[in-house]
Amino acid sequence: MKILSKTSADYKSMPWKNGGGITREMAIFPEGATLGAGDFLWRVSSADVSTGGPFSLFPEYDRLLFLLSGGGMLLSGEGRDVRLDHPLAGHSFRGDVPYGCTLLNGPVTDFNVIWRRDVLNCEYRTIGTEGKENLFLEGDVSFLFSPSGNVSVRGEYEHALKRMDLMIFEEYFTGLRLAVEGRDGFLLSVTLTKRQGTEIIH
């Protein structure tokens, strides 16, 4: 099993692909891949959004976006509007379909996952950390993200997640059991699973 732990000090700030803002890249695979080259399999990031506008387009990729904090946002695309107005409200959409956002009440912070749709499937769940709960990891790559901190994750070891910390699990056995415990917060679990007939090279 391979586990990577990342904190805010590890994240890389960079301009959006469309030049409309700044994002913090938390992790990208494979290492050294870039948005510009379009040679990445998946990417995890967070952004502070101070004004509304269009999202960057990512042909061949799908996207998952969550609201972390702020007054909420209205996503518009594919002929409909999606309102994200509470913490960890999320929406998945195709990266090659024009989407934009309108801020509902001032700046927001969001969390994003983007992946190659021909190689991977994506699933997620949110976990309230008031007390203890067991989490079983499936798929091929899993991310645990703590937007508010005060979360303990125990498996073969114990790891304390602070605000905006990220854990990446790879090469684990299906059904890996983790014990999650915390207070006054949430944990976001995202799992990527390779599609039949494809391979993920670690």
Image: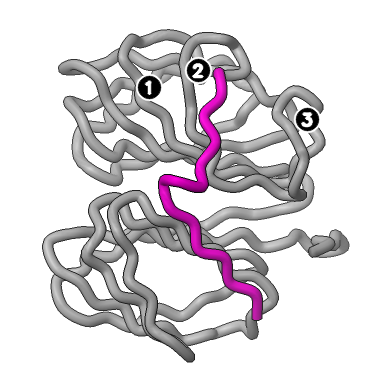
Q: Is residue 85 above or below residue 105?
A: below
**What is the crowding at mark 3: few (fewer than 14 residues within 10 Å), some, or many (at least 20)?**
few
Residue 91 appears in the figure: no
Looking at the rendering, the stretch of residues picked out in magenta corresponds to 1-15
Q: Quadrant of residue 196?
A: bottom right
Labels 1 and 2 touching (C-beta < 8 A): yes
Q: Is residue 118 above or below residue 62?
A: below
Q: Earlier in the sequence, mark 2 or mark 3?
A: 3
Q: Main secondary structure of the magenta part?
A: strand
Give yes or no for residue 107 being in the magenta stretch. Answer: no
Under circle 1, the secondary element is strand
Residue located 15% across and 78% down the image = 131
Q: Amino acid at mark 3?
A: Gly
Labels 1 and 3 touching (C-beta < 8 A): no
Q: Nearer the viewer, mark 2 or mark 3?
A: 3
Q: Quadrant of residue 37?
A: top right
Of 132 and 16, which appears nearest the observer?
16
Tag of residue 64: none
Which residue extends farthest front?
A: 9
Of 74 and 167, which appears nearest the observer?
167
The location of residue 164, given as percent across then percent down, is 35, 49
Q: Nearer the viewer, mark 1 or mark 3?
A: 3
Q: Earlier in the sequence, mark 1 or mark 2?
A: 1
Tag of residue 75: 1
Question: Badge 3 is on which residue?
Answer: 38
Query: Tell me, what colour scheme is on the image?
Result: one colour
Tag of residue 99: 2
